[in-house]
Image (spheres, rainbow, N blue to C red):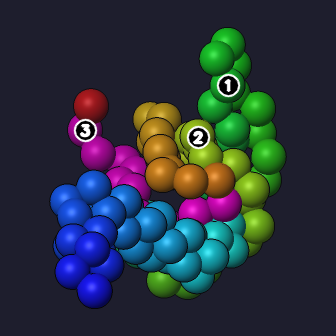
Amino acid sequence: MEGWKDWLLNRVTITFGLIAVVVVAWNLYVQAHDDGVLEGQVVDASGRPVAGAKVVLSERTIVSLAPIAETMTDADGGFRFDGHDRHALVLTVEKPELGQSGRIEVRLYFRNQNRRLRSPVVLGAAA
């Protein structure tokens, strides 16, 4: 019986057990957060929501940007993309009256990761 306890409490066994727990937890997290949802909000320089702005979602490759989807912001300045199936994304936003945003890099930890932008995209800010 002592040999069994020694084997179970061995630091190598504990290390591999912890690694297995982390791998399982990460895979469960990925499975619960891989719908490909990317959402955010567009505001003007004074912080008011911008309705009707065009938001373009592009995939960043080594040599180029390839547009994959576009949408318009709603009355609250919100936008949402579903099922993007990528992990290196770039957003650009434009509205003729307010100008165009710079490129907004959206780097994800895994392909198809759900993400809500932490801060709104600001249009019309002084450069």
Label 3 to label 1: alpha-carbon separation? 30 Å
Q: Are marks 2 and 1 in contact (CB under 8 Å)?
A: yes
**Residue plotted at (62% across, 76% down):** 31
Which of the 4 quarters of the picture holds residue 89?
A: top right
Q: Secondary structure at mark 3?
A: loop
Q: Are marks 3 and 2 in contact (CB under 8 Å)?
A: no
Residue that numbered label 1 is attached to: 61
**Residue plotted at (20% across, 59% down):** 11
Q: Are marks 3 and 1 in contact (CB under 8 Å)?
A: no
Looking at the picture, tell me which residue is in the foreground, 80 or 63: 63
Q: Earlier in the sequence, mark 3 or mark 1?
A: 1
Residue 126 visible: yes
Which of the 4 quarters of the picture holds residue 13?
A: bottom left
Which of the 4 quarters of the picture holds residue 65?
A: top right
Q: How many C-alpha atoms fall within 10 Å of the one at disc 3: few (<14), some, or many (≥20)? A: few
Q: Quadrant of the N terminus?
A: bottom left
Callout 1, which amino acid? Answer: Thr
Location of residue 112 in the rendering, given as x and y in whole percent from the top left corner: 66, 60
Residue 44 visible: no
Looking at the picture, tell me which residue is in the foreground, 124 or 93: 93
Looking at the picture, tell me which residue is in the foreground, 2 or 82: 2
Range of magenta residues: 112-126
Q: How many C-alpha atoms fall within 10 Å of the one at disc 2: few (<14), some, or many (≥20)? A: some
Location of residue 100 in the rendering, given as x and y in whole percent from the top left corner: 51, 40
Q: Quadrant of the C terminus?
A: top left
Q: Which mark is residue 126?
A: 3
Callout 2, which amino acid? Answer: Ala
User: In the drawing, does residue 25 fall left or right of residue 58?
Assistant: left
